[in-house]
Amino acid sequence: MMLPTRWVKIIKDIWSNPSRSLLVIASIAVGIAAVGMINNAGRIIQRDLYSQYAAGNPARLNIYISGFPKELAKSVAGMREVADAQAVRTLSASLIHSDEKKSDINMNVLADYQDVRINRYNVDEGAAVPGIREILIERISARKLGLKVGDQVIVEIDNQRQYKLTVSGIIHNVYILPMTIFNEAFGYISMETLEWMGEMPYYNRLDIVTAANPGDKDHVLNVGALARDRVIEPAGYQVSGIAIPGIGSSPGDHWAHDQIVGFVLILQIMGVLAVFLSCGIVINTVSALIVQQIKQIGILRSVGAVRSQVAGMYMANVLIFSVLGLIIALPLGLAGATWLSYFAANFLNFDVTIIDLPPSVAFLQIAIGLIMPTCAAAFPILSGTRIPVYNAIYQYGLGTRNKVGWFEKLLSKIRSINPPLTLSLRNTFRKKSRLIFTLVTLTLAGAMFIASFSTRDSLNAQIKQIEHYTVFDASLSIPGGANRSTVLREAMRIPGVTLAEGWSEAVGVFVDASNNESEEFVIVGLPYNSRTIDPVMQQGTWLQGAGLPQIVVNADLVQAKPDIKIGSKVTLKVGDHKRLFEVVGITSKHLYGSRIYMDSDSFTRLTGRQNQVDVVRVIAQPGKPGTPAVQEAIAQQLQERFKNAGLSTAIASTQHNFFKNFTDIFNIILMILMIMAGILAVVGGLGLTGTMSINILERTREIGVLRAVGAANAAVLQVVVVEGLVVSLLSWIFGALASVPVAPALAAVVIYAILETRLNFRYSVEGLFLWLAIVLVIGVFSSLTPAYRAARLRVREVLDYE
Amino acid sequence: MKSNGNNHGNHQLIELKDVTKVYHTPAGDFTALNGVTLSIGSGEFVSIVGKSGSGKTTLINLVTGIDDPTSGEVYVGGTPVHTLKEGEKASWRGSNMGVVFQFFQLLPTLTVLENVMLPMDLSSRFPISEHAERAMALLELVDLADHAHQLPSMLSGGLQQRAAIARALANDPPIIATDEPTGNLDTKSAESVIKLFENLVDQGKTILMVTHDSDLAKRASRLIEIADGKIV
Ligand SMILES: Nc1ncnc2c1ncn2[C@@H]1O[C@H](COP(=O)(O)OP(=O)(O)OP(=O)(O)O)[C@@H](O)[C@H]1O
Ligand SMILES: [Mg+2]
C-alpha cells in the first residue's frame, strides 16, 4: 500500500517519541473520559433512580396522627383533592445482633400488604408479605447487619421487652433513608406481630398522593391542612405534624434530589477543568514539538512544502493523538460511569438497570475529543509554521530575537550580585505566552487547592459554631414529656451534675392575616436565661425575660421564610392555639434545621401544656462541656436514672457524638475536593516540566556558553531551578489572588449541594501556605530533570547542535 | 507557479539585476550584497567562491528564494522570484529548484528513500504510484540504492550529502543550488559529490555551487568570485 510520505513522517514522529505521544494521548483520554463518565453516570443515576422512585408511587405528603384505624385512610382518600392515602404504623425499636450489639430499627406496619399503593417496595428474596412473628428487612439494612432469609433477630421495644422474629424476606424500598447514611435499620411487620409484641394495633402516619399538582409544595401542604381540618380532626384524631418527605425536596422528588443535582454540578465543574487541563498539556507538548522540529520545518519548506502543508501535517499529527485518545476515552469513560453509577446505587439504594453509552454522550465525547485538541494545538502550530524558511534554517528557535519591551527593560534594571540569578530571572520572562500558559495552569490548581481547604474550614467553623447551641454534657429526650420539677430533681441527683434544664418542643405554623398557614417549624421552649445555649446573634437580641411575647429564630428559618425580620409581629399556631409574638433576634445557622425559640412560660401559654418538658440537658461545669469520656459517663447515668424512674427509655446522647455525625459526611466530599486539587497540582507540575524542557532545549547554545565560560554543574543547575522556582512563586501569588473569588464560590456551591444552606465563609490561611510549600516542591522537581539534562551537556555537543 | 517561458524577454536561466541585500542588526545595518548583476545560462556549472563573510551564502539564498533582496530583481526561469510570497516561493522551489545545504537536511525519522520521496509528495507533480520507483532510480543515480531503507543517522556525512542531492532531484528541477556541499566531507567523498554534479550537468542541469575549495571550484565551467558583497 502506498502511504503518502508526509503521513509516513507523521506516524514515525509519533512513534519516535513514545513518551511524549503517550503523555498527549493520555491527557486527551483522561479529559474526555472524565466528560463521558460524569455525563453518562449522571444520566444513568437520574434515569434509574428517578424512574424507580416514580414507579412505586411516592408519597407526596406525610401526616403524623395520634393513633387511628385504617378506615381513616379511606375517608381521606375519598377527598376530592386526594388521589390516594395509605395508613402506616411506624415504631422505633432496637435490633439486637448475635453479638449483643444494638442498632436502631424503624419498624413499619402496612394495613394491606397484598395491595400496597403508595411507596411500593420490591422483593429481592423470600416473602413479600410478613407473616406472624416474621419481619421483612430492607436490603441495605440486611447487608449491613449481615442478615439472610431465615435468620432470627431479636427486637427490643422500649429498651426492655424482647421479641424473637424470623427474617422471611429481603425487600428493596427506595423511599426510606438507607442505613448506610442514616444508621437506622428498616423492617416491615404485620399488625398481628405488632400486637403480639404488646403494642396497640393502631396506625400513626398517613401517606398521601394528591390528585392535582403533585409537585407543588404549597398546594400539597394545603391539601394536608384540608385533610386535617375536614376529615381527620372532625373524626376525633389529633394531627401532630404535616411534612413533605425528603431533605428539603419538592413533593414527589427523591429525598436527595437537590443534593444529587448539586453533586452532579460539582462533577461537571471537575469535568470542564479536566478538559481544560488536557488542552493545556496538548498546547505545551505541541509547542515543544514545533520548537524541536523548527529546522525540519525549514527543510520541508526548502523542498517545496507550503505553510498549509506543514501546518496540515502537524494538525494531522494532533488528530491522530485525538483519535487514539478517544479510543481509550470511550471505554474508560464507560468504565468510570459504571463505577460511579454503582457507587451511587449503593449509596442511594437503587438498581442500575443497564450500563450503556448513548449516542448523545458518545457524540459529546467525540466532538470534544476531536475539537478540543485541534483547537488547542492550532495556536502553536499556526504560529510555529508562520516562521520564514530563512529563520527556520539559520536561526534555531522561534522568534529568538524578541523585541525589547518595557518588561525586559525593567528586568534589566534588576542588579544582582549573582549573575546566574539575574539570568534565571530574565529567562523566566523571555517567552511570555508560554510562561502565561504555565502560570494559568498552576494558578488554577492553586486557587482550587486553597478553595478546597477553605471549604473544609468553612464547614468546620460551622460545626464549631454549633457548640454554642449545645453547651451540655448529655441530653435525653423524654417521649411524651414529663413534669418539669420531677425531671430536674431526677437529673440533679446524678453525681457531678450541677445544672439541669428542661426544654420543650412543639411544631407550629405561622398564620398570616388571611389565615394562610406556612409549612411547619419546630418551636423550642426554654428558660429565657438558659445556660446550655450560648446563641450567636446575627441580628437583634436574645429573649429578654420570662413570659414575654417574644421569639428568636435562627438564620435557617429566615432562609426558609424570608419575610421574617427583626421587629416582625407574627402569629404562631400550635394545634388550636394561636398567639402573637414579636421577632426580637436572629441567631446563626445550626445545620439541623429551622428553630423558633421562646421562653418556657410563653411556650406553656401557646401550647397549653403545663410544666411539661420533652428534653433534659445536663452539664457538670456550666459553660464548659467535659471530655468525651466524662460526657459518656454522665449520659450513661442519665439514661439509667430516667429509665429506672419510668420517665424515659430513650438513649441519651452526648454533645461530642452530636458532631461526629456531621464530620463523617463532610469528609467524603472533602476527599473528592482534595483529589481534584491533587490532580490539578500534578497536571500543573507536568505543565511546568514541559515548559522547562522546552526552555532548556531552546537555550542549548546559551548553556554551552555558560559552560564554556567555566560555569560548574551546580551553577547551570541553579540557573534552571531558580527559573522553575520563580514561576512557582509567581503562580502562588496569582493563585492566592484568584482564590479570593474562587474559594467562596466553591465553598458556596459545595455547601449548598450537601446542606442546602449558605454558610459563613472562612478563608483557609493554612491552605494558602500549604500550597506554597507544594508549589515550591513542584517548582524544584519539574525543573530538576531538565536542569540535569542541561548540566550534562558538554560544550562540544552544544556546538554540534547547530 | 512554474514558468517555462521567458516572459521578460531574456534568454538567461538565472538573472540578478542590481541586487542589494542589507541585514538589519542591533549593531547597525550591514550590506552583505551591493548592486550585484549576474546572468547564468542553462546548463552551466557555476561555482561561487570568496572569503568568509563575503556574501556567498547570501547570494545563493536570494536565488533559491530562501531570502529576499532588499532591492533589485531576481529572475529564475523567467519567474520574478523577488515578487513571490513566502508560500508561493515554497511551492515554486519544490519543482524548479533543488536545494542542498552543508548540514542538517535529512529528516531524521524518515529513511533515505522516504526523504527522497518527500518533495514528490509535496508537489504532486508525479502520480503517487511512481514515487517509490522514481526515488529508487535517483538513489541508484547517486549510488545509494543499497542504503535506501536506512535512517540518515546510520550514514556517513558523504553518503548523507549524496542522499540530499538525490532528494534535490526528486521533482526533476532544472537547477540545483548548493551551499558548501563538500564543506563537511573528506577529500574522497567530496570528489564523488563533484563527480555527481558533473554527471548532472552532462544531463542538462544547471548547477550553482558555493565552495571554499579552490581545486573543486576549478572543476566548474564558470567561476564567480565575490568580495565584500561585489562580484570581482
Ligand atoms: N541574518 C543575518 N543578519 C545579519 N548579518 C548577517 C546575516 N547573515 C549574514 N550576515 C552577514 O553578512 C555577511 C555575508 O554573510 P554570508 O553568510 O553571505 O557570507 P559567506 O560568504 O557565506 O561566508 P562563509 O564563507 O563564512 O559562509 C557576513 O558578514 C555575515 O556576518
Ligand atoms: Mg556561507
Image (spheres, coloured by chain):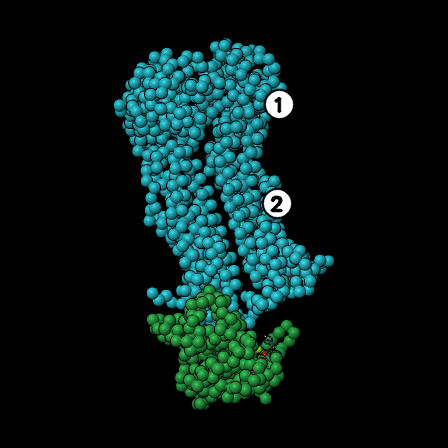
Query: What residue is at 41 percent from the left and 21 percent from the top?
Result: A105
Chain letter of disc 1 in the image = A
Mark 2 residue crowding within 10 angstroms, few (<14) / some (14–19) / many (20+): some
Q: Is mark 2 within 8 Å of ligand 1?
A: no
> From the image, which quarter does the N terminus of chain B lie in?
bottom left
Rendering quarter of residue A90: top left
Callout in the foreground (1, 2)? 2
Please, what is the three-letter code of the amino acid marked with disc 1? Lys
Query: What residue is at 41 percent from the left and 33 percent from the top?
Result: A347
Q: Which chain is green?
A: B
For label 2, the SS is helix
Chain letter of disc 2 in the image = A
Mark drawn on residue A624: 1
Q: Is mark 1 within 8 Å of ligand 1?
A: no
Mark yes or no: residue A109 visible. no
Q: Label 1, label 2: how many angstroms apart (C-alpha)?
A: 38 Å
A520 displayed left or right of A191:
right
> From the viewer's perspective, is residue A7 above or below residue A558?
below
Rendering colour (chain A): cyan
Mark drawn on residue A773: 2
Q: Nearer the viewer, residue A571 or A167?
A: A167
